[in-house]
C-alpha cells in the first residue's frame, strides 16, 4: 500500500458526454484529495462490452426535451460482444451526430466532438472527457491495457478477449468453454482456445480485487450501484466513500464552466 493517499474511482465509458454520476464521482474524489492530499486514479473499465453503457442522454437547450444518442456499430456481433475498447467508431456516425448536437450543447462541445477522431468507442469517450477538462491532474489506468492485465492478480471469474467470426469478442470462461450471453437464459458456447493473461479482464464480482492488485488505492469513491455488489471485506485496506448525490444522474454532464 502507498504511504500517501491514492483516491480511486472506477467507471466504464458512460457516454461520449459523461453521465452526471461520473462527474459526481470526480467531484467527490477531488474533495477528498483537497482534504487528504495524494493523487486521484481513474480506473477506466473500457474492457466492458455492454453497448448500453455508452448511451448519452442530452436535453434540448430551449425545450428541455431529452435526446438519447449512442454509437452505431458495423454489425450485431461487434455491438453485443466486442469490448468497448475495440468497438469501432464510424465516420458517418460522427458526422451525423455532430449535426444534431448544436441544439443540445454549447458550441465549444460541438467543436470538441467534431475534433475528436478516436477510432474506438472507449478511446472516443476518454478523449472527450479529457477535452472537457474533467480528467486534468488525474492518472488514468485502463482495464484494456495489456501491461495492467499482466500485472493484475488472477481471479476465478473472468472474461477473455478472443477472435470470433472476424471480430474480437469478450467471452466468459465457463468450465472448459467460452460463453456469450445472448440475453435471458440464452447462451452461445464455443470451444476453448489458448489465451494469455493479456487477454483477460474481470467479471463484475471480481473486478475490485483485480483492480486493487494493481492500483493499490487507499480510498475508493463508489457509486450507488457499485455499493450493492462491491465486496468490501475482500479489500479491508480500502476506505470506501459514497459519491456525492446529483440530480438526473444518468443524463449527460455538459455544464463545465467556461
Image: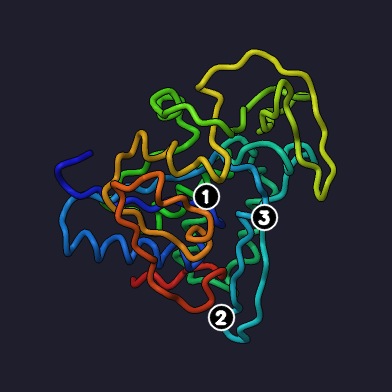
How far across and how far down the image is residue 249, in percent? Answer: 52, 71
Q: Tell me which label, 3 or 1, sits earlier in the chain.
A: 1
Q: Nearer the viewer, residue 102 or 88?
A: 88
Is disc 3 placed on a helix, strand or loop? helix
Q: Nearer the viewer, residue 210 or 110?
A: 210
Decide: few, some or many residues near mark 2? Use Cα within 10 Å; few <14, some 14-19, many ≥20. few
Q: Is residue 216 above or below residue 127?
A: above
Marks 2 and 1, how far apart in space? 27 Å
Marks 3 and 1, how far apart in space? 11 Å
Decide: few, some or many residues near mark 1? Use Cα within 10 Å; few <14, some 14-19, many ≥20. many
Q: Is residue 203 above or below residue 108?
A: above
Is disc 1 placed on a helix, strand or loop? loop
Residue 88 occupies which quadrant of the picture?
top right
Mark 2 or 1: in front is 1
- What residue lies at 56% left-to-right and 80% top-to-bottom? 61
Q: In this view, does 101 lie above or below 73?
A: below
How far across and how far down the image is residue 194, in percent? Answer: 64, 13
- Residue linked to disc 3: 52
The quarter in which the C terminus is drawn is: bottom left
Q: In this view, does 83 lie to the left or right of 23?
A: right
The quarter in which the N terminus is drawn is: top left
Decide: few, some or many residues near mark 3? Use Cα within 10 Å; few <14, some 14-19, many ≥20. few
- What residue lies at 20% left-to-right and 40% top-to-bottom? 2
How far across and how far down the image is residue 43, in percent? Answer: 41, 45
- Residue linked to disc 2: 61
Q: Tell me which label, 3 or 2, sits earlier in the chain.
A: 3
Q: Tell me which label, 2 or 1, sits earlier in the chain.
A: 1
- Residue linked to disc 1: 12
Q: In this view, does 184 lie to the left or right of 25?
A: right
Task: Kindly check if marks 2 and 1 are in contact, taking CB atoms under 8 A apart as contact.
Answer: no
Amino acid at each position: 500500500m502507498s504511504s500517501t493517499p491514492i483516491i480511486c474511482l472506477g467507471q466504464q465509458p458512460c457516454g461520449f458526454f459523461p453521465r452526471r454520476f461520473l462527474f459526481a464521482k470526480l467531484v467527490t474524489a477531488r474533495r477528498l484529495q483537497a482534504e487528504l492530499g495524494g493523487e486521484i486514479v481513474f480506473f477506466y473499465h473500457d474492457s466492458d462490452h455492454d453497448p448500453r453503457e455508452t448511451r448519452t442522454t442530452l436535453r434540448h437547450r430551449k425545450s428541455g426535451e431529452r435526446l438519447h444518442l449512442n454509437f452505431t456499430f458495423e454489425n450485431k456481433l461487434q455491438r453485443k460482444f466486442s469490448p468497448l475498447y475495440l468497438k469501432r467508431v464510424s465516420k458517418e456516425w460522427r458526422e451525423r451526430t455532430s449535426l444534431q448536437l448544436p441544439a443540445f450543447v454549447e458550441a465549444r462541445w460541438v467543436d470538441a466532438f467534431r475534433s475528436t477522431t478516436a477510432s474506438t468507442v472507449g478511446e472516443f469517450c476518454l478523449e472527450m472527457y479529457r477535452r472537457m477538462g474533467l480528467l486534468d491532474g488525474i492518472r488514468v489506468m485502463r482495464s484494456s491495457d495489456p501491461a495492467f492485465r499482466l500485472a493484475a492478480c488472477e481471479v476465478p471469474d473472468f472474461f477473455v478477449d478472443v477472435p470470433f467470426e472476424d471480430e474480437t469478442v469478450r467471452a466468459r470462461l465457463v468450465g472448459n468453454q467460452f460463453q456469450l450471453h445472448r440475453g435471458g437464459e440464452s447462451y452461445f458456447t464455443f470451444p476453448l482456445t489458448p489465451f494469455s493473461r493479456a487477454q483477460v479482464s474481470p467479471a463484475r464480482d471480481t473486478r475490485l480485487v483485480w483492480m486493487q492488485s494493481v492500483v493499490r488505492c487507499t480510498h475508493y469513491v463508489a457509486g450507488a450501484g457499485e455499493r450493492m455488489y462491491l465486496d468490501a471485506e475482500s479489500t479491508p485496506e480500502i476506505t470506501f466513500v459514497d459519491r456525492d448525490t446529483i440530480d438526473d444522474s444518468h443524463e449527460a454532464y455538459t455544464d463545465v464552466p467556461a
